[in-house]
Image (cartoon, rainbow, N blue to C red):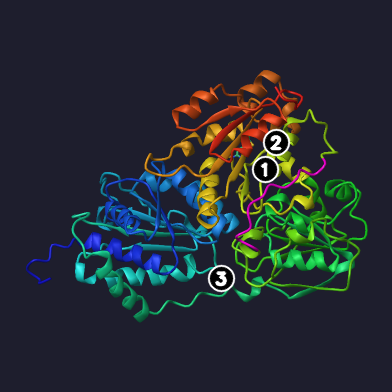
Amino acid sequence: MTAGDDRRAPASEFALALLLALVERGVTDLVVSPGSRSQALALAAAELERAGRIRLHVRVDERDAGFLALGMGLATGRPAPVVTTSGSAVANLMPAALEAARDRTPMLLLTADRPSWLRGTGANQTTDQAGLLGDRAVLNLDVAPVTDADAAVAAAAAVALEALPVALEARALRRGPAQIDLQFTEPLSGPHTPIEALLPRVRRALAAGRAPLDVAPPAAVLGGPVTVDAASTLVLAGQGADADLVRRAAERGCAVIAEITSGLRRWQSELPGGYRAWLDAGAPGVRTVVATGLPTLSRQARQVALRPDLRLVTRAPLPGECFDPGHRTERVAEVRITGRGPWTPGGRAEDAPASAAGAPIHPDDPADTADATAPSAPRPTAPTSCMPPADARGAVVDAVWAASGPADAVYLASSTMVRVADERVDPGRGGVPVLAHRGLAGIDGTVSAASGVALARVARHPDAVTRLVIGDLALAHDVGGLLVPPVEARPPLQIVVVDDRGGSIFAGLEVAQADPALYDRVVRTPQRYELTALARAYGWGHVRAHDPAELAAALATRRPLIVEVRVDDVGGWA
Ligand SMILES: Cc1ncc(C[n+]2csc(CCOP(=O)(O)OP(=O)(O)O)c2C)c(N)n1
């Protein structure tokens, strides 16, 4: 192409080169919300999809786009970059990004912006959106517009190389959301070099550039390694727990409590009466508590961590917040375990990963570490001795676990049901991958996040079904997550809605003693929506399950479906 007939739009040349660079370095999925300022990125994403180089997911609502990407990041450990236009669109990514910051899920926000000289001038759809996450982001880049098509590849490679070590490397020392704010000037899109011609140039530019070295966490933050004695150690694992530490602890005979959202339940010890009762009994014999991840699901776990007579050690190798209820934990990068304790893990041997080599993509993903080709055969349900059959919530947990195999996944919405599952699922049923966003324990974005998990799982295991267990308010909160463009495959997701008319979680709190009418009006907040009509409006199948058999039959279809379970005021099937 000669200078005279060069009609390439720098915006499009740059956008395609940037996305190609990310794909070259491992990005497989992109999430796009529509807009004008972001058109070059969006069109480049669509072209890459057409060329079979990425999977593209389009969501109208940026909040849903953010949570969809969060779910993919949770399931794979890699970010699915999210493309948005400028203005309030960017702010809609905030809830998912805050969650990602807390539970250190990789996330890459590609936010299109107007050129910096329009900031502060009252320009349409323009706000101070670069660096919106502040220091919650692991990286903030504010990228000036590329105005010369010949400079586009070098500029794109420079941006990618700056972001890659932080945003993409699985072993990055910082993990969480990264924002690349990309300023674009007119023309916002236009002709560009074809993918096949651009790719070798992008590869050369990536190879020629040098990625900045990642910054090690300040040494002062981390003590250790600490050595603990298995016989007197309790390991407490929450979401994001270190799988290797938990496995070593279980094999050494430590007492292990693995919250259901740690995904490591199979390593939990057989503690008399269940872990809550054992903790209530004073955790006999324990002198040291080792925490890993973010335990959030029981009052007892927090209390044991606060006991002044026990030493608290938290394994938290990455900078940022860690589990430290009493502001006194010994924060360490590594925990060594000596000796031998009396406890045995309750999980079955075949639930354990075949090999400890190579970190699983998700800590409780036996399908990713063991035989990934094994059929996702449902497990027999464990005896449900601790709850009467009339307990509808318990029956939902049993049915979901019975229907799910190791290549499937269960996503637990925040609120009552995650706690029911935590109490009820014994280690013998610990082979099913469990995911949740427990960092901030929001009830927002749950349908979208579970959809992201479902899409990530099925990309790896073609028959995988993800099952979301969600309350009626959390579903209402993310109705928009049900909206899937007609050209896109519906995520292989079954949504079990436990409808107890509002937030039942509050019934166990002091607020439940308030005037019942006031309590209902502003706390429990029962809603009235017709789930059948809602499902139809968004193109989902819907069934109502009146008993465990109907629920099991619905789940056994393995088809995308909304399954409604109505629960009465005493917890039975309504
Ligand atoms: C984004 C967000 N808003 C509000 C809350 C507070 N909250 C926690 S649980 C809950 C009620 C959830 O009700 P539902 O989804 O029906 O579940 P249930 O309690 O009935 O199991 C609310 C409003 C929250 N965690 N996150």
Q: Give the left or right position of residue 159, taking residue 564 as reference.
A: left
| Residue bearing mark 3 | 171
Q: Is the residue marked 3 within 8 Å of ligand 1, measured from its CB?
A: no
Instruction: Mark 1 or mark 3: name the one nearer the start of the chain.
Output: 3
Q: Nearer the viewer, mark 2 or mark 1?
A: 1
Which residue in the rendered view is the most extreme toward the left? 4
> How far is mark 1 from mark 3, CA to CA?
34 Å
Q: Which residue is mark 2?
A: 396
Q: Quadrant of the N terminus?
A: bottom left
What's the residue type where badge 3 is placed? Arg
The residue stretch that appears in magenta: 371-383
How far apart in space, not on screen, are marks 2 and 1 (Cα)? 11 Å
Residue 224 % position (x, y): 73, 75
- Of tags 3 and 2, which is closer to the observer? 2
Question: Where residue 500 appears, x then y in whole percent?
Answer: 66, 27
Q: Which numbered disc, 2 or 1, marks the residue that appears first in the sequence?
A: 2
The residue at the point 78 percent across, 45 percent down is 299
- C-alpha span from label 3 to label 2: 37 Å
Between 556 and 561, the one nearer to me in the picture: 556
As drawn, 204 above or below 10: below
Residue at disc 1, CB closer than 8 Å to ligand 1: no
Secondary structure category for the residue under label 1: helix
Q: Which residue is mark 1?
A: 403
Q: Is residue 38 left or right of residue 311?
A: left
Please provide percent x and percent y for residue 425.
Answer: 76, 46
Q: Helix, strand, or loop for circle 3?
A: loop
Q: How many marks?
A: 3
Q: At x 31% / y 56%, what residue is drawn?
A: 41
Question: Percent from the top left, x then y, of residue 507?
Answer: 73, 30
